Amino acid sequence: MLTVLLVDDDPEFTDVACTIIEFLGHEVLTAANLEEARDWLKKESFDHILLDFMLPDGSGVHLFDELDALGKRPRVTLITGHPSVRGIIKGLCGPNIDYLVKPIQREEIEAVLSGKTEVQSQSSGSNIKKYFGHLIGESKPMKELYKLIERVSRTSANVMLLGESGVGKEVVAEAIHAASDVEGPYIATNCGAFSKELIGSELFGHEKGAFTGAVGRKSGVFEQAENGTLFLDEITEMPIDMQPNLLRVLENKVVIRVGGTKTIPVNCRVVSATNRTMEAIAESKVLREDIYFRLAVFPITIPPLRERKEDIPLLATAFIDELNRENETQFSWKEGQLETLKEYDWPGNVRELRHFVHRAAIMSDPDKSALELPKTIESPFAKKQSTTPALQAGRTIEDVEKELIYATLEKVNGNKTLAAEMLGISTKTLYNRLHAYGDLSKDD
Amino acid sequence: MNDKEFAALAAHVHDARKPLNRISMQAELVKMALDGSVPPDRAKQALDKIIISTKDCSEALTQMMDALGDSQSES
């Protein structure tokens, strides 16, 4: 059961909404404006606030600073009258806010209160299936992924998501949360986004006066994700000297807030993510081994977009549908355009595709349905992936040679005979070199 | 359409959406009453309120037309 504060200035709406929220098994209090809401926040502690964007005495966003200062920050769902407001608020308030767009349906209220958002609205024009409410794709690698998600969702095991930048690790994390039958919310944080000093407070919370600027008590993400799912993005960017603290939480399932003494029990599934490969994690020592085994009980590798090109038309269509809904446009793809999209390698993966679609929609005439594609698909990051690093003065011949050999081997999928032929050396020489690099054992 | 007219239009749309939001919630209540989750008399009240809200919505749209018509004739 949650304690919910509903802030809206329409008494008839709040009256019915209360009946429905109470029926869903929650306790609900109402406020008609910011002032009443502030009064309630002083007297009561809330798990969730449903907040109208437009209130008689100001915008609901004004409440955010006060919420930050609370000991336990409630989840916030903003109620807006117009879909376009959503984009603006998303930029203002970050990803941890949900939205309801009026007119509201009961399922939507149910979904935000349980933390399982993004119910497919019935009015949406497309019939593209979203697996677990989030994932798009009918390709074989994705079907494999769905199977893994389904398996792991039945357990409470910690999951580590591996995959290149832009493959949608956060979306998969949300899908795992949606597939799991859990009561608690989905909380996401980025371990790479905090300084060494602040990450402790973000993860574990802090007590009032724990450090300069700690004006109030704050619960950490582990506490906020109670009985739910905690998504730790860019886990390998977490400072190594903070990792023992994280390990303690994972092992003992209790947190101690920064500056506090009391242990607080926590219970949530931790889904972590990194864009490094498993080998790179082991080699670069960015993650302690003991932490790795705690977090990667169930590792899942998300395939890059170039390995599931048949999904590109589905994704591009889903993105354009979404943009059409937001901007009330009627864009649609032509068959040939989708083919063009499929030919490109998308080194920035789904994120790059989404960005590309968005740009195409902006560039096209909003009164027509035809989309204009730029002549070439380019990304400033594409070069980094497709070519080997440029030669630099001062590198040893051995170094460059080694790199060339490995790049060639990668190109021919490890076929040594073919690689030797391309390099213009004998197979024996190639084997000798690989021996010298310690990459082959004697009997190989 | 200039900024001022657009703001006026946005205000009208806001007024028209308010009854729609009420209708949506009242309809959910009726659905719950049909399931037996809330007493049937609440459903009847809800339906009455839906009818009132449709009139409110229609009224808001009429006002919008009038206001826009005025601004058309001014220009």
Image (tube, grey):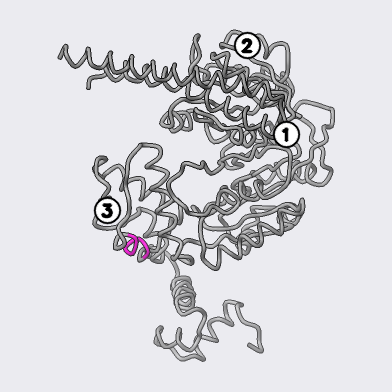
Q: Give the side of residue A271 with respect to residue A247, left or right.
A: left
Query: Which is nearer the N-term, disc 3 or disc 2?
Result: 2
Q: Amino acid at mark 1?
A: Phe
Query: Which is nearer the N-term, disc 1 or disc 2?
Result: 2
Q: Is residue B32 above or below residue A160?
A: above
Q: Is residue A295 above or below residue B31?
A: below
Q: Amino acid at mark 2?
A: Arg
Residue A393 visible in rendering: no
Spatial distance from mark 3 to mark 2, Cα to Cα?
49 Å
Which residue is tagged 3?
A373
Q: Position of residue A352 (x, y in %)?
A: 41, 52
Which residue is tagged 1?
A204
- Residue B25 lies within the magenta run: no
Q: Looking at this view, is A138 or B42 the one in front?
A: B42
Which chain letter matches label 3?
A
Q: Residues within 10 Å of mark 1 (few under 14, many from 20)?
A: many
Which chain letter matches label 2?
A
* Magenta range: A338-342
Q: Secondary structure at mark 1?
A: helix
Residue B52 visible in rendering: yes
- Residue A341 lies within the magenta run: yes
Q: Amino acid at mark 3?
A: Leu
Which residue is tagged 2?
A38
Query: Which is nearer the N-term, disc 3 or disc 1?
Result: 1
Q: Secondary structure at mark 2?
A: helix
Image quarter in which the C terminus of chain A is found: bottom right
Q: Residues within 10 Å of mark 2 (few under 14, many from 20)?
A: some
Q: Position of residue A271 (x, y in %)?
A: 67, 49
> For the point 36% across and 63% down, which residue is it?
A344
